[in-house]
Image (tube, grey):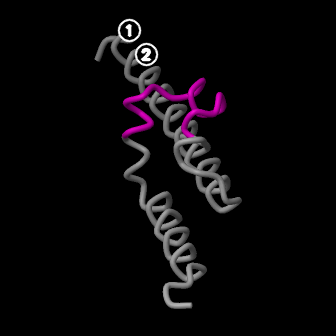
Amino acid sequence: MPESKLREIIARFFEELGEDVLEERVVQYIVRELKNGRHLKEILEDPYVTNRLSEEKVAKILSNPEIIDTLQEQIEKTFEEFKFFE
């Protein structure tokens, strides 16, 4: 394998690794903010998110199980707090 090809493979590996770490940090930020009671739409408009991820990447991380679980918890909490028959 030519040395230039090896360098290209290594560079791509580290670039993808960096992107994965960045995405995970944004996921953790979104989860934390959701647990603090913020709305998802508001969080997704934060400069912390918009400056780090493209719209395509944001769409991808929204399928992250940790975000989905947190959203489900927030929905359940909202329904528990709502009094249907009072």
Rendered view: 67 above or below 82? above
State the SS at label 1.
Answer: helix
**What is the distance, in whole Å, between disc 2 and disc 1 at their CAs?**
5 Å
Name the kind of residue labelled 2 in the image. Arg
The residue shown at (38%, 39%) is 59
Looking at the image, the residue that sits furthest to the top is: 4
Q: Are marks 2 and 1 in contact (CB under 8 Å)?
A: yes
Reply yes or no: does residue 9 show up in magenta: no
Rendered view: 54 above or below 28? above
Of 11 and 74, nearer the camera is 74
Magenta stretch bounds: 44-59
Reply yes or no: does residue 47 show up in magenta: yes
For the C terminus, the quadrant is bottom right
User: x, y (%) of residue 41?
Assistant: 52, 43
For the N terminus, the quadrant is top left
Name the kind of residue labelled 1 in the image. Ser
Looking at the image, the residue that sits furthest to the right is: 36
The residue shown at (52%, 40%) is 23
Q: Residues within 10 Å of mark 1 (few under 14, many from 20)?
A: few
Of 17 and 56, nearer the camera is 56
> Would you name the residue on which mark 1 appears?
4
> Would you name the residue on which mark 2 appears?
7
User: x, y (%) of residue 54?
Assistant: 45, 25
State the SS at label 2.
Answer: helix
Q: Could you say which quadrant of the image residue 7 lies in? A: top left
In the picture provided, is 83 more to the left or to the right than 8?
A: right
Dominant SS type (magenta): helix
